[in-house]
Image: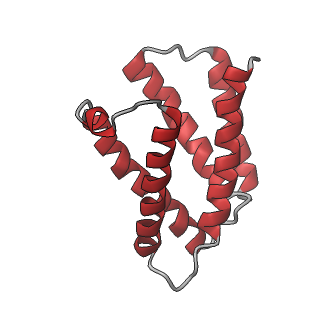
Amino acid sequence: MSVAMLWPILLGICSELLYQICAKSTPEGIHPLASLSVTYVVGALVSTVLYYALSKGGNLLREFSQLNWSAFALGVAVVGLELGAIYMYKVGWAVSTGPLVKNVCIMIALAFVGLLLYHEALTANKIIGIVLCVIGVVFINK
C-alpha cells in the first residue's frame, strides 16, 4: 500500500481516537451544544489556517462561491454525529463498545447505500462480513 493510500487512513484513525476521547471527556454539567459551539469555532480556525498553508495563493472567498448543497448538509450531519457521540457517553455507553456498535451499524447501512445509490456490488464476501459484524455486535452487548 502506498503512502498516498495510507496517510488518510492513519489520519482518520488518530483523529477518531482523539475524537472519542474528547467526546467521552466532555464535562457532565455542560450542555453538549455549548461545547460543540467552541468545537466548531476551533474547527473553522484550523480549517482556515490549513487552507492557506496547503493551497498556495488560494482564495477562500472564490472557493466559497463554488460550494453546493453538500457542504451545508455535511455541517448538519457533523452536528448530529458529534451530538450523538456526546449523548452516547452521557447515557452510559462505554468507550470500548459504543463507537464500535455505532460504526458497525453505519457500515451495514452504507453497504446498502452503496448498492442502491451508487450501484456498488454487494458480494457474497460483503454479506458474510455484514453477518459477522452483526454477530460481533450481539456478542459485545451480552
Left or right of 96? Residue 124 is left
| Occupied quadrant, residue 37 | bottom left
Q: Quadrant of the N terminus?
A: top right
Q: Is residue 98 visible?
A: no
Residue at the image point whose x is 75% and y is 51% from the top: 139
Left or right of 25? Residue 142 is right
State the residue lying farthest toward the left.
65
Nearer to me, 124 or 51: 51
Q: Is residue 115 visible?
A: yes
Q: Quadrant of the C terminus?
A: bottom right
Reply above or below: 19 against 110: below
Nearer to me, 67 or 21: 67
Give the image location of residue 75, x and y in percent: 36, 49
Give the image location of residue 104, x and y in percent: 62, 42
| Occupied quadrant, residue 7 | top right
Left or right of 89? Residue 94 is right
| Occupied quadrant, residue 99 | bottom right
Nearer to me, 75 or 64: 64
Nearer to me, 49 or 106: 49
Left or right of 87? Residue 79 is left
State the residue lying farthest toward the front.
57
